[in-house]
Amino acid sequence: MRRTHKALALPILALGLPLAVLSGCGDTEKDTGPEVVPEASAPFVAPSEVPAAVVPPADNPLGSFDRLAVQADGQISSAVYAKAAQQLFEMMDVEHDGNLSAEELAAGARLLVQIDGMTPDALLKIADNDKDGKINLSEWMAYHNGRFTRFDSNGDGMISRAEWDAAIKPAS
Ligand SMILES: [Ca+2]
Ligand SMILES: [Ca+2]
């Protein structure tokens, strides 16, 4: 019986100790008034706006003849080219506002350079028809329609590998 009494007494003491400490603290707190937790101390969560997700050049839909030609018997059809051009636009339009801003063009510079060595400034000069400093989808597609026509030197509506290579080589 005594053994069990002692065994029980210890936990009770242990519980009593924190209580005594807490009540002691309570007395001192009365002097300083209720503690106010400032809301500013809450951890600041930064907005998750990552600066322009950069698409690896290897994923450029317009990056290589082979990537474009798979869907059209070893040649690039205008439909496939247009679809890939729109895809690249959407990849670069990080804000999804239907415009490639100067920032988005700069962020996508490594993709642009795969298109005839194009730079953001050069593209704006050539394709920014309404001169707002951005490239919208219709300006982008107009530029790429022109590029397709330029590549398709025999005018059959398809870009063959020979036509692609001939058009690409002068730029590099
Ligand atoms: Ca524009
Ligand atoms: Ca052709």
Image (spheres, rainbow, N blue to C red):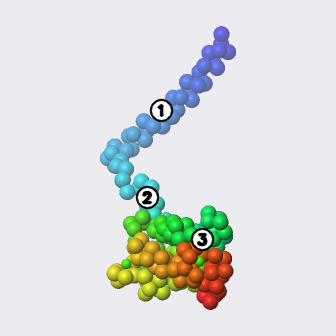
Quadrant hosting residue 29:
top left
Question: What is the CA distance from the residue labelled 3 to the residue labelled 1?
Answer: 80 Å
Which residue corresponds to mark 3?
76
Residue 84 seen from this side: no
Q: Residue at x 53, y 28 (%)?
A: 15
Residue 64: mark in rendering? none
Secondary structure at numbered mark 3: strand
Q: Residue at x 53, y 71 (%)?
A: 78
* Residue type, numbered disc 2: Phe
Q: Is residue 113 left or right of residue 132?
A: right
Q: Residue at x 56, y 27 (%)?
A: 13
Q: Residue at x 43, y 77 (%)?
A: 142
Across and down, in percent, residue 106 comes to 49, 78
Q: Residue furthest left?
A: 33
Image quadrant in which the N terminus is located: top right
Mark toward the start of the polypeptide (1 vs 2):
1
Question: What is the CA distance from the residue labelled 2 to the residue labelled 3?
Answer: 51 Å
**Marks 2 and 1: in contact by CB < 8 Å?**
no
Secondary structure at numbered mark 2: loop
Residue 19: mark in rendering? 1
Mark toward the start of the polypeptide (2 vs 3):
2
Question: What is the CA distance from the residue labelled 1 to the residue labelled 2?
Answer: 34 Å
Residue 44: mark in rendering? 2
38 in relation to 157, above or below: above
Across and down, in percent, residue 83 comes to 51, 66
Mark toward the start of the polypeptide (3 vs 1):
1
Q: Is residue 109 left or right of residue 137?
A: right
* Residue type, numbered disc 1: Leu
Q: Give the foreground label among 1 and 2.
A: 2
Across and down, in percent, residue 57 comes to 61, 72
Dot 1 crowding, Cα within 10 Å, few <14, some 14–19, many 20+: few
* Residue type, numbered disc 3: Ile
